[in-house]
Amino acid sequence: MIIARLRGRPAFTAAYFFAFIFNAFSLYWVALVTPPGTAAAVVIVSFYYTAVLVIFNRLHHRRPLYGAIALPFLWVGMEFFRTLSQFAFPWSDLGYSQADYLYVLQIVSIISVHGLSFLIVTVNVLLWQVFRRGLSGERRITCGLISGAVVLLLVAYGWAVMPPYPVAGTFKVAVLQGSVPLHEKWARANEDYSLQLYDSLARSIGDSAVKLYIWPETAAPSYLSHSPSDRQVVGATARATGAYHLVGALGASMVGREPRHYNSCYQFNPEGYMEARYDKVRLVPFSEQVPYQSYLPFLRREVLSKYLTFIETYDVQWWSDFHPGDSLVLYELPDARYAVLICFESTFPNYAREAIRKGADFIVGITNDTWFGHSVGVYMHSRILLTRAVENRCWMARAANSGISYIVDGYGRIRGELRLDEVAGLVGGIEMLDGRSVFTRIGDVVGLASFLITLATIGILLLLWIFRRVFPAASSWR
């Protein structure tokens, strides 16, 4: 490892260069949504990786064994840290790289995606020892055998726990995918186009056994909370199908004299009445909101536009001034309860777990990945929700405006799917949750433990640095 051989400023420079390139290649597609958000994400998130690698570098130079043991904890501690605060951006966790390999992925039902990341880093550290100069042949062979054993055990566990014959779901839902282009969706006074399109998709299903129709994020591009005419249109669709409808739309409310806007979803009952609403709690930093915007009002678009005139001149896509919702909501059906993860919320393992522990029988994910075009971001996002399903052994249904929409079981097996840009409705059965996984019961133990060990490591290194400053003649730590 190049960083292990460097010291001081060159080590920091190499670590940040790696982090910057890694994030630039994995997050480039964010520029399709917001160029300023991309710059902020790449520059800021790169410091997370840099900090981990610099700490590893310091430990490695004190004693190589310390660095090798600490690196998996440091990396996963960083991934866990990225789920905290309004700056949270837990997108590129290493564990998601295995979402297409279902036998390997099954372990997340015990140790979460962060536990899988821990194993991936551990295997790579062991392989590094195999090729590292200065180690005895015996140690190299031992490290190689252990890394191979870890992979084989992961595959064996997945093979053992995954039922060979998938059971069909009995609770019927319909996932609607309109694939409405953004320039049509958000054109002024053009919400009727989207509403009529989804009305026609719902009516075309023609299956009276469907109990819930799922519309994507902002499928109704209007404030349903303040638009009686649009509510009437959606209500008429619900009455015509005789089922419940979950509709992604915008929301608004007044807090004191301040208007607040939300990314929301609403449930309509078969009689056509809007009966419940959920406002997205976890917002994308520097895309949907300015982190801690109540305390940093100078970063809002209307304030910056006064001084940075190019924002208006060139119609730069700045971050939206959405506000987060108050709490998770469980939607009630006659024979089931479900929770909704709106877009970015699917990246938080503990948020999906919270929904299950509150009593959700299944989870719905709605998103509008049209912003990402045909970039890798569409596929990355798709596999994140699938990982949440395996973690909690919970069936999930995903409605994406332009794809990828699907129904997935608790083992990550997709039971039905709509391709990218397809305009159609997907009818399928889902099964109610019949038990809780180890992860659901005990939580993200690996992630939290790694985070605490990372904090302790940083604290020890700081104390040693202070000690050397105060007592320069003292011997160095060994």
Image (tube, rainbow, N blue to C red):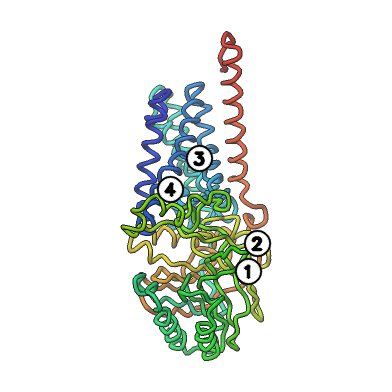
Q: Amino acid at mark 3?
A: Trp
Task: Give the SS element for disc 4.
Answer: helix
Of badges 2 and 4, nearer the viewer stands: 4
Residue drawn at x 40%, y 22% as measured from the top left: 134
Residue that numbered label 1 is attached to:
433
Residue that numbered label 3 is attached to:
75
Residues at marks 1 and 2 touching, judged by CB atoms closer than 8 Å: yes
Q: Amino acid at mark 4?
A: Ala
Figure quadrant of the C terminus: top right
Q: Amino acid at mark 2?
A: Arg
Residue that numbered label 4 is attached to:
41
Figure quadrant of the N terminus: top left
Residues at marks 3 and 1 touching, judged by CB atoms closer than 8 Å: no
Q: Of the numbered discs in the image, which one, if any, rests on residue 436?
A: 2
Mark 2 or mark 4: whose residue is earlier in sequence: 4
Q: Considering only vertical position in the picture, is 113 above or below 44?
A: below
Residue drawn at x 40%, y 40% as measured from the top left: 19
Task: Give the SS element for disc 3.
Answer: helix
Mark 4 or mark 1: whose residue is earlier in sequence: 4
Mark 3 or mark 1: whose residue is earlier in sequence: 3
Q: Residues within 10 Å of mark 4 (few under 14, many from 20)?
A: many
Instruction: Name the residue at the top extreme.
Output: 473
Q: Residues within 10 Å of mark 1 (few under 14, many from 20)?
A: some
Relative to residue 122, is residue 38 drawn left or right? Answer: left
Task: Indicate the quadrant where residue 337 lies.
Answer: bottom right
